């Protein structure tokens, strides 16, 4: 209760105007019955109103002043996280949780942390499976999400299938590809994984796979746009310009293929990756070595 001291009397007197305003604020601050349906976040501070009222004297009169609750930014982050496609692994795969027992692990983690702090353009990590590539890339995404950036996760094999399936439906395809084209941060996991094996040999990406890679990196250009309409091959035009040209867009790529492997598939794509990773500074290649596969760590070998 706000009190004032009368100069002639030591008895405190109640500031009635303040008390009235405080009551009005209390009514306005009554908690909502429901938490935010989009995030299920329950905020004790604002009772899920997302705003908090408090009394303040303005020009000699007490008024109800409203301030946004700090849970608003938490809710935004949670929404972005749900949209990103990384909700289930983001808390598990952090820089802090990345287990280091060898020097090469320290080196690649430092590189990933440095990339995140510098907010550079593209990050590429390729090579040996099971060495923590997804972990580090997810850690980068987690940091960008908490910085307020929009992040989209793309699992190459699955999402390319979906893109290919909409090739003859212009608006559906455009909507899908725009998701990957425009997000502030795009994480492409298992880039150029084909999932196709012939006699135990993994096949190279098809020309359609390569074209989609171009499309996402390039985005729409007028030339390609016309070409799409002529050729009815909508998937042709989304990868190469937009994310490549736009300085503010961050792309993180993990792949079992090294940059040298990508060069064998398509020189132009590999060249752009090198260029955008600060001419290889943020491009990591983990050479094939089964001992680097954490999934094998408990095997006893004789
Ligand atoms: Zn709140």
Image (cartoon, rainbow, N blue to C red):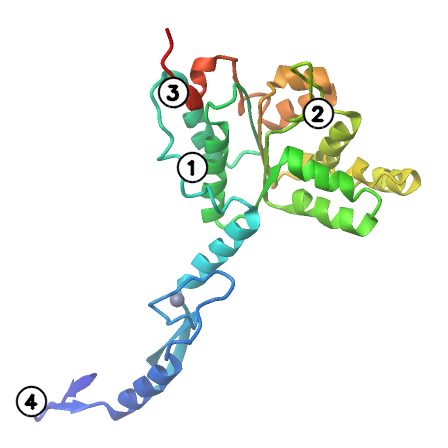
Give x and y (percent) for residue 224: 84, 38
Query: Quick check: 8 left or right of 203?
Result: left
Mark 1 lies on residue: 93
Identified at 83% across, 41% down, the residue is 234
The answer to which of marks 3 and 2 sits earlier in the sequence is 2
**Is residue 157 visible to the viewer in this orientation of the structure?**
yes
- Tell me the quarter of the picture where residue 90 sits: top left
Mark 2 lies on residue: 269
Q: Nearer the viewer, residue 249 or 195?
A: 195
- Tell me the quarter of the picture where residue 99 sits: top left
CB of mark 3 within 8 Å of CB of mark 2? Answer: no
Identified at 50% across, 40% down, the residue is 141
Query: At numbered mark 3, what does the secondary structure look like: helix, strand or loop?
Result: loop
* Callout 2: CB less than 8 Å from ligand 1: no
Gap between marks 3 and 4 measured at Cα: 76 Å
Mark 4 lies on residue: 10
């Amino acid at each position: 209760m706000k009190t004032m001291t009368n100069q002639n009397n030591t008895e405190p007197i109640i500031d009635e105007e303040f008390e009235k305003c405080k009551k009005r604020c209390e009514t306005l601050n009554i908690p909502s019955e429901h938490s935010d349906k989009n995030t299920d976040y329950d905020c004790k501070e604002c009772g899920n109103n997302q705003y908090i009222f408090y009394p303040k004297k303005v020009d000699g009169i007490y008024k109800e002043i409203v301030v946004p609750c700090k849970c608003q930014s938490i809710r935004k982050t949670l929404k972005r996280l749900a949209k990103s496609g990384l909700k289930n692994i983001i808390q598990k795969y952090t820089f802090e949780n990345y287990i280091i027992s060898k020097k090469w692990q320290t080196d690649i983690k430092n590189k990933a942390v440095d990339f995140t702090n510098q907010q550079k353009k593209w990050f590429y990590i390729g090579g040996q499976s099971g060495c923590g590539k997804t972990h580090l890339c997810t850690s980068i995404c987690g940091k960008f999400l908490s910085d307020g950036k929009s992040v989209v996760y793309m699992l190459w094999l699955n999402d390319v299938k979906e893109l290919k399936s909409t090739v003859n439906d212009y608006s559906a395809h455009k909507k899908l590809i725009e998701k990957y084209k425009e997000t502030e941060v795009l994480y492409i996991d298992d880039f150029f994984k084909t999932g196709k094996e012939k006699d135990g040999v993994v096949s190279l990406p098809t020309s359609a796979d390569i074209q989609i890679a171009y499309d996402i990196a390039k985005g729409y250009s007028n030339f390609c746009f016309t070409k799409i309409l002529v050729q009815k091959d909508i998937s042709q035009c989304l990868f190469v310009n937009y994310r490549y040209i736009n300085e503010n867009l961050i792309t993180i790529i993990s792949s079992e293929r090294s940059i040298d492997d990508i060069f064998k598939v398509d020189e132009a794509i590999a060249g752009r990756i090198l260029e955008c990773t600060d001419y290889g500074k943020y491009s990591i290649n983990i050479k094939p070595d089964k001992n680097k596969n954490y999934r094998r760590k408990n095997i006893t070998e004789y």
